[in-house]
Image (cartoon, helix red, strand yellow):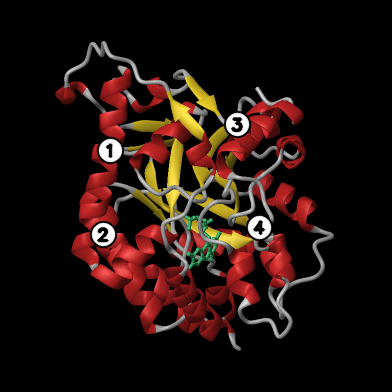
Amino acid sequence: MNRSQRKLAHIREAVDQQFPRINSFDEMEIIHQSLTPLNWDQLSLKVDCGELSLSSPLFVNAMTGGGGMPTEEINKQIAFAAYQTGIAMAVGSQTSALKDEKEKRTYEVIRNENPSGVVFANVGSEVTVDQALTVIDMIEANALQIHLNTMQELIMPEGDRDFSSRLSKIENMVKNVNVPIILKEVGFGISKETALQLKNIGVKYIDVGGKGGTSFSSIENRRREKPMAVFDNWGIPTTLSLKEVKTAFPACHLIASGGIRDGLDGAKSIVLGAKMFGMAGPLLKTLVQEGQDELIQKIHHIHDELKVAMLALGAKKVGDLKGSPHVFYGKSKEWIDQRKLN
Ligand code: FNR
């Protein structure tokens, strides 16, 4: 299977995978408060995440580009929805555009739809500083996401097997790239130990990309002759990954993603210290199956859900949700205790 075919297969399989599922957000509950002092019109969704100023904490996380017309059309439609709703968006890995000039268009198209919105470029940790600068330039990106996807590569039959120079390459990019660099996982989560390694090389932004939503081991397993289904459940659940990173690296600009289903999951991630939250698979499913207008409506609905939680809890600004009283049950509680998470 070539790179383009693989990208299209990922889209099909990721859409198929979006069925209602229980995840770590169900083992966390925010405590209701009955005496809010606020009025709906006072609520503001504006947030700052380090150097990034955003009109909403919600963003469309990295998905696609580089698979010819179908991915160009998806990126175009996501960009238009992001423009209409004022949210940020990431494009999928731009490595293919570094290898094939013709693929550039599938990414560049987002700037026709969304000339001044906040957009994130995306590459793997194997690229050089020059290549990182090229992908940023390609879409005039406001930040660069570098994905860490070891488990996906390992399950992928044709995936990478050598990760030995990764940390030094990331360090080099952090030192030589002049937009914020966000290190992100793709559904397996970031641990305390990894967060510390990233902190030590100067990383300031981490998107935990935890377990609970789209599973790339299960997507890649579908293409293996001998699937390794034992790894379909591998990874750090998103709520716990947020706590892992916050414990090891409290000053980090923390971003939540992985299995966020609605505005309440988003609110829970802000309670846990995230400044933004990203959604990928569920938004793709809406776009592919129901169209662009429905995607725009879904984004508005997620904003409304977030605002209901904010109003109920007396949070005028999104950031005021941070630290709201909450509890964890079951496995999550055991994880937090054994890992001594704050
Ligand atoms: C992804 N994801 C992803 N991430 C990344 O950093 N670069 C990429 O190229 C891609 N490609 C990609 C394709 C498709 C079809 C999907 C659904 C996802 C991972 C994505 O950004 C996110 O980390 C995970 O999907 C987990 O979030 P959700 O889907 O549970 O909200």
Q: Label 4: which residue?
A: 233
Amino acid residing under circle 3: Cys
Q: Residue at x 41, y 31 (%)?
A: 48
The location of residue 285, given as percent across then percent down, is: 36, 66
Residue 78 as seen in the image, left or right of residue 84 = right
Please tell me how crowded label 1 is: few (under 14), some (14-19), or many (20+) other residues with Cα within 10 Å.
some
Q: Earlier in the sequence, mark 1 or mark 4?
A: 4
Amino acid residing under circle 1: Glu
For the residues labelled 2 and 1, the Cα–Cα distance comes to 15 Å
Q: Earlier in the sequence, mark 3 or mark 4?
A: 4
The relative height of residue 324 versus residue 21 in the rendered view (above or below) is: above
The location of residue 44, given as percent across then percent down, is: 26, 28
Q: Earlier in the sequence, mark 2 or mark 4?
A: 4
Amino acid residing under circle 2: Leu
- The numbered dot on residue 295 is 2
For the residues labelled 3 and 4, the Cα–Cα distance comes to 27 Å
Q: Earlier in the sequence, mark 3 or mark 1?
A: 3
Circle 4 SS class: loop
Circle 3 SS class: loop
